[in-house]
């Protein structure tokens, strides 16, 4: 994995864990926020809003349903246009 | 781009009846207003002028509320032209009255599509940005027919009752994001919709209204004005009836 990937994933992980109030060592790239970490599915909107601000991107509403784990969130961020 | 200083409202079914009165009232309240209309372009242009005369920015778009893509475009177009939507009001509605035993499938589906799916389409499209900003107000126009039912209006009553369930569920869902969702349930209001009623039906209705008259669209708009304002900051999931006492 490249440094760029590692760095961005670390940023995303920090944001997600902060919002979902879970420890960073509890979450893996594929563990599911809702099923594995008891997260409220509506928290995705808070993650989305923070990612948009942090990375100056615009994430489409249709992506909300995809944002189920860190890997998927990373892909959404990578695919999002600049705001 | 002009710096946004005023609040922005989006009203469906804005060119006539309760929607039109709401557009004007919210403009008087200081909102820049976008509205959509289905058929009456002349009325829409006239209303645009009236809003501009009030010194507010206005955006009128022809859009079918049943078409989710068109509604998404309406919302994004409003946000681009006027700014983020603070208040969304769904006033688009139709009737296709018939006793159930004689009702055509088309009459059922048309009414549910405009009256209920239209509400879903607008709320779904506009609540996304509201949730991100943690602010916003939604007012959906239902009807006393949705609370108590009206003979020959199973389709209309079902759609308007659906709006009440939808709005209460939404109010629970988005309350912690600082968003309120309420319902206005008018009785007989003097609009194009009720003017199509036969004379005898109107007379009979008048006899059952304790206040002895039809309501005015402006009176309903006043209630919408209250609900979107900070005066109603602790009101959500409510169904406010404005019906001259017909349901007492």
Image: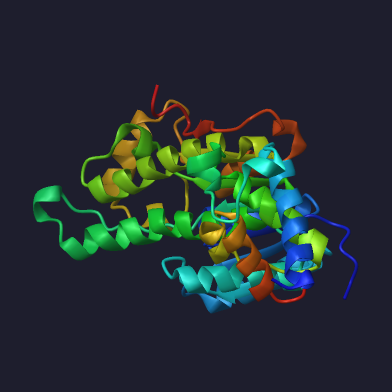
Up the image or down, B196 lies above or below B147; here it is below
Q: Looking at the rendering, in which quadrant would you find the C terminus of chain B?
A: top left
The answer to which image quadrant residue A80 occupies is bottom right
The color scheme shown is rainbow
What count of labels does the image hold?
Answer: 0
Q: Which of B112 and A44 is in front in this view?
A: A44
Find the residue positioned furthest to the front.
A1
How far from the left and from the top, in percent, is residue A78?
68, 72
Picture residue at 76% right of the left edge, 75% below the top: A82
Picture residue at 54% right of the left edge, 78% below the top: B41
Image position of B217 (left or right of B31): left
- Can residue B24 be seen here? The reply is no
Q: Nearer the viewer, residue A5 or B112?
A: A5
How far from the left and from the top, in percent, is residue B16?
53, 62
Q: Which of B65 and B27 is in front in this view?
A: B65
How far from the left and from the top, in percent, is residue A18?
74, 42
- Can residue A32 be seen here? The reply is yes
Up the image or down, B98 lies above or below A61; here it is above
Picture residue at 51% right of the left edge, 74% below the top: B70
Q: Looking at the rendering, in which quadrant would you find the N terminus of chain B?
A: bottom right
Picture residue at 27% right of the left edge, 39% below the top: B150
Find the residue positioned furthest to the left.
B101
How far from the left and from the top, in percent, is residue B204?
29, 37
Q: Nearer the viewer, residue A59 or B100?
A: A59
Up the image or down, B30 lies above or below B178; here it is below
């Amino acid at each position: 994995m490249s440094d760029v990937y590692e760095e961005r994933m670390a940023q995303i992980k920090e944001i997600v864990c902060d919002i979902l109030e879970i420890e960073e060592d509890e979450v893996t790239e594929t563990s599911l926020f809702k099923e594995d970490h008891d997260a409220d599915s509506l928290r995705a909107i808070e993650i989305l809003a923070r990612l948009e601000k942090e990375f100056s991107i615009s994430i489409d509403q249709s992506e909300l349903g995809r944002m189920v784990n860190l890997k998927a969130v990373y892909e959404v961020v990578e695919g999002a246009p600049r705001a | 781009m002009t710096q946004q200083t005023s609040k922005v409202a989006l009203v469906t079914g804005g060119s006539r009846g309760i929607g039109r009165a709401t557009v004007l009232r919210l403009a008087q309240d200081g909102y820049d207003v976008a509205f959509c209309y289905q058929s009456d372009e002349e009325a829409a242009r006239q209303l645009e002028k009236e809003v501009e005369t009030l010194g507010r920015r206005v955006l009128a778009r022809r859009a079918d509320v049943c078409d989710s893509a068109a509604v998404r475009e309406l919302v994004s177009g409003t946000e681009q032209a006027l700014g983020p939507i603070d208040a969304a009001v769904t006033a688009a509605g139709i009737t296709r009255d018939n006793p159930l035993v004689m009702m055509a499938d088309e009459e059922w589906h048309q009414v549910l599509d405009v009256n209920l799916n239209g509400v879903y389409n607008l709320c779904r499209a506009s609540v996304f940005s509201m949730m991100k900003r943690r602010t916003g107000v939604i007012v959906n126009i239902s009807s006393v027919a949705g609370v108590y039912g009206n003979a020959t209006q199973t389709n209309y009553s079902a759609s308007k009752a659906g709006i009440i369930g939808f709005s209460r569920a939404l109010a629970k869902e988005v309350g912690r994001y600082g968003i309120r969702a309420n319902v206005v349930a008018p009785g007989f209001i003097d609009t194009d919709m009720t003017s199509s009623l036969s004379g005898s039906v109107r007379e009979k209705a008048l006899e059952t209204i304790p206040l002895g008259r039809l309501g005015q669209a402006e009176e309903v708009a006043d209630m919408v004005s209250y609900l979107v304002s900070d005066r109603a900051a602790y009101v959500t999931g409510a169904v406010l009836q404005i019906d001259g006492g017909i349901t007492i």
